[in-house]
Each structure stands twice: as structure tokens, then as C-alpha cells.
Amino acid sequence: MRTERSFRGISQRLARHYLSNLGGTVESDDRVVGESWEASLSSQKVSIGPSLSLTEVTIVFEGEEETLEPLIEDFAQKAMRAGG
């Protein structure tokens, strides 16, 4: 299974940290690997209105469906708390 999700208001460094806390091993700045899953990260600045921009981190999760669903949910909860 392959799922792409984007998260605003967190850094790529923080996303790596969250993924490592969820059982992953950081292999590089843009790749974290866990048991039965892997995540590729990228980030960009996105404009919100005429004068505000945020970092948007995009993560491509790959792995077994039964592993990815709870992993993505747990990650999203951590990212929501950080961005708010």
C-alpha cells in the first residue's frame, strides 16, 4: 500500500522525529524506515494569503495496510498537536 499525506505547520526535522518515536529508524534527512513500513519526506513553503507562508511536509508512506493505518493516524495526531 502507498499513501501520500501532507501536514502543514511542522518541519521535516520534527516529522522525522515523530516517525522515529513511532518505531522508525532515520536513514537520511528524507527517509525513515520501520518494521513493515517506510516513509519518504519532502517539504516546501506554501502561501497562506498574501503575506503568510507555512512549511508543508509531504510524506509518502509505503507498507502493509494493517501497519500503515494506525501509523498514519498516530503520526497525524502528533502533527496536529505540533501545528496547533
Image: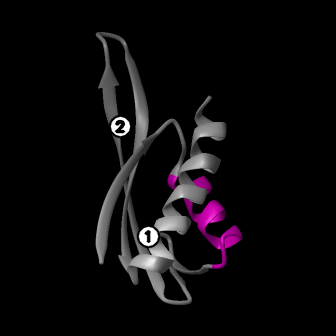
Look at 29% across and 10% down and name the residue there.
50
Residue type marked 2: Lys
Look at 61% across and 54% down and name the residue there.
14
Look at the image and name its color scheme.
one colour
* Mark 2: few/some/many CA within 10 Å (<14, 14-19, 20+): few
Quadrant into which the C terminus falls: top right
Look at 60% across and 58% down and name the residue there.
74
Q: Is residue 31 visible?
A: no
Q: Quadrant of residue 39?
A: bottom left
Q: Quadrant of residue 40?
A: bottom left
Q: Position of residue 47 (x, y in %)?
A: 30, 24
Residue that mark 1 sits on:
30
Helix, strand or loop for disc 1: loop
Q: Are marks 1 and 2 in contact (CB under 8 Å)?
A: no
Q: Is residue 15 located in the magenta-colored stretch of the structure?
A: yes
Give the CA separation, mark 1 to mark 2. Answer: 16 Å
Q: Which residues are magenta?
A: 12-23
